[in-house]
Image (spheres, rainbow, N blue to C red):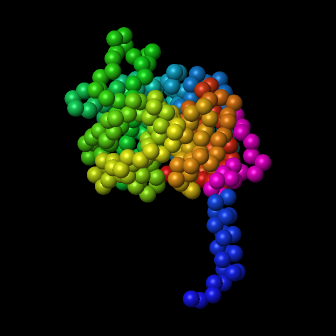
Amino acid sequence: MKNQNPFLICFLTFNLLFATAKSQENLIAKNAKIEQAGSGFSFTEGPAVAPDGKVYFTDQPNDRIYVWDEKAGISLWLEGTGRSNGMYFNSRGRLVTCADEKNQIAYFDENKKLVPVHEGYNGKHLNAPNDLWISPKGGLYFSDPYYHRPWWPEGHKEIQDVRGVYYLGQDGSIIRVIDDFKTPNGLIGTPDGKTLYVADIQANETWKYDIQPDGTLANKTFFAPKGSDGMTIDDEGNVYLTSGKVWVYNPKGELIEEIEFPESPANVCFGGKKRNILFVTARKGVYTLKMNVKGVQ
């Protein structure tokens, strides 16, 4: 047996400890403080980062979408949004949305016109699409719980037999991929398109799945004892959940950070030119926090 090089062992150990420290202890940039980027909204939701780093978010009760720029601040982008909730930019730069005024998946065209993409399953209308994620291959996963909205017509009822999660293929086909949750809500996938994280907000649990080539899910695995209204993921593979605070779990499902905000977070994403600014929608306000990690698309 050859003698081991003590200097090599020391070097490797240092690098391992450094990597662990980066992913578990130094997520937040040095001297960074939580800043209120905007206030005076009714209920902020659905942050989505555009290719240029700007973040679009909704004030759903007022049926508006705003855009945040790290230099210019916040401006109104659109009024009359189909009551947009969760949103995500696709590979073509289109803003795709869960528009629950009419319970649709839709997108905004170059004229900001809302274009419906899908609204039903098994011949019945969807309950109310809530959050979505678009895979690298272009397929779309969305949660479809049921929260009664004051803007729905009188007598509106839950239509689907379960509160499920669906996969919408690029060819327009739709399949239900989760049917055993109490109330699915936040979801996010990894940038390699191999793993999907989904929160059951009523059960206060988050689960992870292996994504199959046909869009179905396999190997359901418990991930975290927290539900979540919204989710994001960073370039270290850490998953950010929103439930009273922002809770950060590493890929092993270990809690590595808790971040408290002045208001209870609803949803979260990374924005800015470098994607290193954590952007949080939280009730009547929106907040930012500079990070040492970056978001992924």
Q: Does residue 26 show up magenta in the picture? A: yes
Q: Is residue 199 above or below residue 29?
A: above
From this viewpoint, which residue is outermost toward the bottom? Answer: 2
Viewer-proximal residue among 64 and 135: 135
Q: Is residue 83 left or right of residue 218?
A: right
Q: Which residues are magenta?
A: 22-36
Is 230 displayed left or right of 261 in the figure? Answer: left
Which x, y percent locates residue 262? Answer: 69, 30
Please check the rendered image and state whether residue 108 is part of the magenta-colored stretch, yes or no: no
Q: Position of residue 181 (x, y in %)?
A: 38, 34
| Quarter containing the N terminus | bottom right
**Residue 66, how many percent across, how many down?**
56, 33
Question: Residue at left 68%, top 53%?
Answer: 25
Is residue 247 visible to the viewer in this orientation of the structure? Answer: yes
Answer with the quarter of the image where residue 282 lies.
Answer: top right
- Residue found at the very far front of the displayed protein: 1
Residue 203: where, in percent of width, then height?
Answer: 45, 31
Q: Main secondary structure of the magenta part?
A: loop
Tell me the residue at 32%/53% (across/down).
Answer: 212
Q: Residue at the location (41% across, 33% down)?
A: 184
Pick out the residue farthest to the left: 123
* Residue found at x 64% / y 60%: 20
From this viewpoint, which residue is outermost toward the top?
A: 154
Q: Is residue 49 visible?
A: no
